[in-house]
Amino acid sequence: MPATPVPRRALAVIAALPLLALAACGYGSQAKDDDTVRIAAGAKKIDGLDSVRIGYFGNLTHATALVGRQQGFFQKELGATVAQYATFNAGPSEIEALNSKSIDIGWIGPSPAINGYVKANGKNLRIIGGSASGGVKLVVNPEKITSLKDVKGKRIATPQLGNTQDVAFLNWAAGQGWTVDAQSGKGDVSVVRTDNKIAPDAYRSGSVDGAWVPEPTASKLVAEGAKVLLDESHLWPDEKFVITNIIVRQDFLKEHPDVVEAVLRASVAANEWINAHPEQAKAAANEQLAADTGKPLPADVIDPAWKSIAFLDDPLAATLDAQAAHAVKAGLLEQPDLTGIYDLTLLNKVLAARGEATVDDAGLGVR
């Protein structure tokens, strides 16, 4: 998708924004290594490695990681190599943890993966697999907004400047013919960057009229009286778009491919179990969320949220490329070269061994 390059000064300002989020979020919470109790007697370390550090968000769109941990899929595949965990609130902090070698492998959204890859000139990470699609909705105050055209002139929350949902909403608004300044959020519709944790309070107070947000935040707002106006999946071919990918440090992938392959086997097995046992998987994900955050999600939030997320191994690479083009169009990203962001070799090895179809990197793989 052609677009006018953004001046490098603007890009520098945009690149600095994640550092502000990092200062607020830190490197994430180090979770207790509860899966060590599932190490089988006689199990051996893979490649002699003591442990592998796995990062993810306390978010339903990261349920592959939640379930993989809670049900012991990771530890089973890793043998006596201990699975250690860290949870994060935002993509920039997880990318920083990856860059500082505080984690080895992580579950993350497309925008922070793109931004992290571009900022490091393609030298820090690889996307090695998919995890989830969907789970993003535009929810609104039904007393103020009853149709898509009513969104014009209203205040709509997105989680963070330049994050995956922020880019998606700006692109959708542009498609309606509306003009919005991406940096300030001002224009024909006001974009109010609001952390997902406080979005329900912002909605309740009336400071925003709606939000373009991932699950479970969307369903939390619905529980406050909001209505779903649009499911983002309806805007994509086959109603699929990447919301969560698996990334790895390039040096770790090079040095410990057998460990990375084991984690991918666990991820594929977890997704298979999730899709075969949706109710049990939902309960397992909620149990891990409770352990990570201190409380489970109530039924009126987790039930609708769970139904809107598809768990799959395909990273849906073409949709990530489209999301990057949307960020460029919005003026949030200079035209990137994403060649090499994917290395799906090990994932396709795992899939082929299971007799499943291999997946495509949309021409953005390692050459």
Image (cartoon, helix red, strand yellow):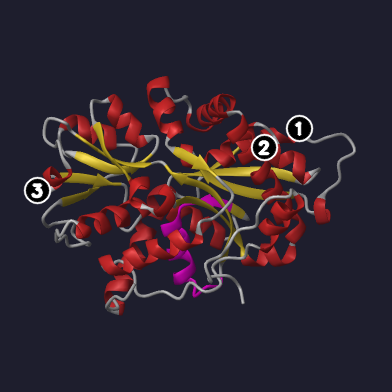
Q: Residue at x 37, y 46 (%)?
A: 233
The location of residue 159, given as percent across then percent down, is 32, 47
Magenta stretch: includes residue 153: no
The location of residue 242, given as percent across then percent down, is 46, 52
Crowding near the residue tagged with mark 3, few <14, some 14–19, many ≥20 C-alpha atoms within 10 Å:
some
Residue kind at label 3, given as amino acid type: Gly
295 in relation to 63, above or below:
above
> Does label 3 or label 2 sit earlier along the sequence?
2
> Does label 2 or label 1 sit earlier along the sequence?
2
Kindly state the secondary structure of the residue where label 1 is placed: helix
- Residues shaded magenta: 106-123
Kindly state the secondary structure of the residue where label 2 is placed: loop
Cα distance, mark 3 to mark 1? 54 Å
Instruction: Evaluate if marks 3 and 1 touch, with contact meaning CB atoms under 8 Å apart.
Output: no
Query: Which residue corresponds to mark 3?
Result: 153
Q: Residue at x 74, y 35 (%)?
A: 36
Q: Residue furthest right?
A: 42
- Work out whether residue 103 can be spotted: no
2 in relation to 303, above or below:
below
Query: Which residue corresponds to mark 1?
Result: 38
The location of residue 348, given as percent across then percent down, is 68, 58
Query: Mark on residue 33?
Result: 2
Q: 174 and 23: which one is in front?
A: 174
